[in-house]
Amino acid sequence: MRRIYESDALHRDTDAPFSPNERDDDDVRPQAARSIPSAAITSAVLPGWVRHRSISVDVSVPATEFTAGSPVPFQVTMKNAMPFPVVIPTESAIQWTWNVDGHRDASHFPLHDPPAGDDAITFDRGERKRYRKRWDQMFRVSDDEWEQATVGEHTIGAGLNVVDSPGKGLYDEATFRVVPE
C-alpha cells in the first residue's frame, strides 16, 4: 500500500468528491466509534417472546450408559441465533441452573440462597456459551451426607434461571442409564 501512496499512481484532489484527500496527521481522533450500547437498545425494544425464541439451550452427555460410580460429564450449550445482542432478565445473579431427576444441583435440599434482586444474562450476536460440568452419581441429602444414585434411568436438565424456563424454550434435558459394574 505504501508504494501506491508514494507514487503518483493515485490521483489526489481536495475539490473532487470521489478522490482521496491528504490526511492531516495531527487529527488522531478515531474515524468511527461505537456510541450506542446495542444490548441496552435491544433489551428495551425487543419483546420478551422474541428474546426467548432467540436463545436455544442444549444439554448433551457423551454416552447413553454409564457404569455405577463413574462420573457423568455433561455439556450445556446456549446459543443466540439472532444477528443482534439479546438480554434475558433472570430471577437472581445465578444465570442458569442444572438438575438431576428434578433435584437442583443434585441436592435434595437448597444449597444456597441466591442474592435477592433481578439480574440478566447477555448474549452477543450469534454468541455461543458452553459450560462443562460433571455429576459424580451422588445426591446430597444433608450438609455432610451423600447418597449413591440408583441403577436405572436418570435425567440431567439445565436451563436459564427464569420463571417457567421449559415453557419458554430455555430448558433442555438429556436422559441416560446407570448400569451395574
Image: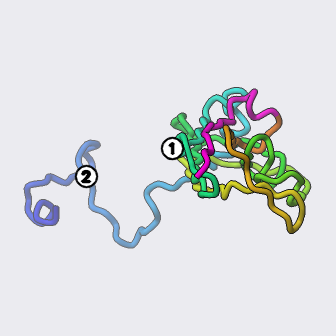
Residue 38 visible in this rendered orientation of the protein:
no
Q: What amino acid is found at the position of numbered circle 1 in the picture?
A: Ala
Q: Nearer the viewer, residue 41 or 135?
A: 135
179 horizontally vs 4: left or right: right
**Where is mark 1, residue-wise?**
63
Q: Gap in Å between the C-alphas at discs 2 and 1? A: 61 Å
Residue segment shown in magenta: 164-181
Residue 92 visible in this rendered orientation of the protein:
yes
Residue with the most extreme bottom position: 26
Residue 94: image x %, image y %? 77, 54
Within 10 Å of disc 2 (Cα), the crowding (few <14, some 14-19, many 20+) is few
Within 10 Å of disc 1 (Cα), the crowding (few <14, some 14-19, many 20+) is few
Residue 86: image x %, image y %? 64, 40
Q: What residue do we see at 74% from left, 46% from top? A: 99
In front: label 2 or label 1: 1
**Where is mark 2, residue-wise?**
20
Q: What residue do we see at 56% from left, 39% from top? A: 80
Residue 70: image x %, image y %? 59, 57
Q: Earlier in the sequence, mark 2 or mark 1?
A: 2
Q: What amino acid is found at the position of numbered circle 2 in the picture?
A: Pro
Q: Nearer the viewer, residue 83 or 79?
A: 79
Q: Quadrant of residue 39?
A: top right
13 horizontally vs 164: left or right: left
Q: What residue do we see at 8% from left, 55% from top? A: 9
